Amino acid sequence: MRAMQPDAEGYVERDGVKVGYEVFGNGDPTILLMPTWAIVNSRRWKDQVPYLARHFRVITYDARGSGRSDRPADPAAYASREIGEDAVAVLDETCTDAAVAVGMSRGGGYLLELAANHPERVLGAVCVGAALGLGDPPADRPSYSFDEPLDSGEGWARYNRHFWLRDWPGFVEFFMGQVITEPHSTKFVEDSILWGLETTPETIVTLEDAPYLPDGARNLIERVRCPSLVVHGSDDHIIGLSGGERLAAALGCDLEVFEGSGHAVDAREPVRFNLLLRDFVDRLRPPAPAVRSWTRARSRRPGRSTCRRRSALDTRCGTWPSPASCGRCGLSSK
């Protein structure tokens, strides 16, 4: 059961890899909600889509390795540049010239790839808890080897390829508990665990071997020209707040801190996040053209009559009233 069904859906294929996308609403401009780490699919934006689609056109797509998209065996197919190019292909397929792009966590890197390499396709950029390697890790996230077998299987030692292949459900449950640490956000954690179990550890291990921002985030940041916004939770256990602070400084844009929220602020505080995003997009709209109005002068000739409550073009039926009556709206001049 979904709160909102897509108005259109389909696939786009690049280099033999199919990517699934969905389109909601028909407003203007378009918002592109980019994928994050392939451990979850595009349904992670379910708290944003119904509201935003009431005001804008919204596009989502599944990253390679998740949802309805293919799971290629070659690590190079999961490179961050490829995910960014998938966004361009989805925009082309949906006849979208440009969009406001939103990237969360690793999706922040995919967003930078898109905005830096295709600036004409991005009206604005919103980075949420972006995983770019700019800041210090959270104090409670110790560093362990990803590639070497570990004796420990507790805590962040589970972020290890050997543990993934041995106990994928154990890692998914632990990791999603770090994404959302607030005790009252159990629904999103449960949903995320189910999404994580829809993919395989082999897929995510392959993805981890792919190039992610090989030239560094700052190289891409310097080429971003669109208006930007950085959003970060003060209690982010995945990407420390300093990462958001340094990203905002590098982009020269505002930083919106969600006090007490963790990594997925959009899921923890969807109302505040949705309103913030709507306000950002509204500020990117071109100013509305000035509206000129005029009133038809009242006739001084005796016997001249007009449709009652209408002195000119009837705004309900769109017809000019006759001296006797309006045949379409039924308003009589008597």
Image: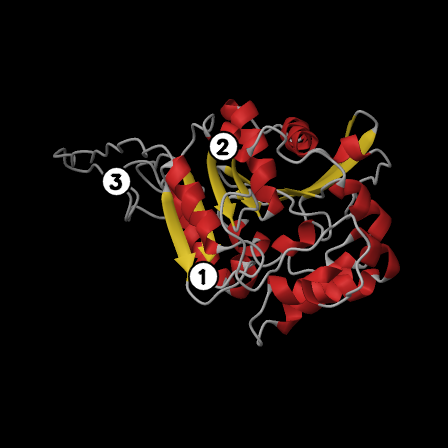
Instruction: Give the spatial CA distance, label 2 vs label 1.
Output: 23 Å
Q: Position of residue 96 (x, y in %)?
A: 58, 29
Determine which residue is flagged by label 1.
234
Specify the label residue 311 is tagged with.
3
Reading the image, the residue beneath label 2 is 218
Upstream in the sequence, badge 1 or badge 3? 1
Cβ atoms at labels 1 and 3 below 8 Å apart: no
Which residue is drawn at the image coordinates 53% and 59% (left, top)?
138
Rounded to the nearest whole Å, what is the CA distance between mark 1 and mark 3? 59 Å
Whether residue 33 is visible to the viewer of this picture, yes or no, is no
Looking at this rendering, what residue extends furthest in the left direction? 300
> Which amino acid type corresponds to the residue marked 2 in the rendered image?
Arg
Q: Residue 113, relative to residue 270: is it above or below?
A: above
The amino acid beneath tag 1 is Ser
Q: Nearer the viewer, mark 2 or mark 3?
A: 2
Mark 2 falls on what kind of element?
helix
Q: Nearer the viewer, residue 291 or 67?
A: 67
Q: Nearer the viewer, mark 1 or mark 3?
A: 1
Q: Is residue 76 found left or right of 261 in the rendered image?
A: right
Placement of 286 over or under 283, stated as above or below: above
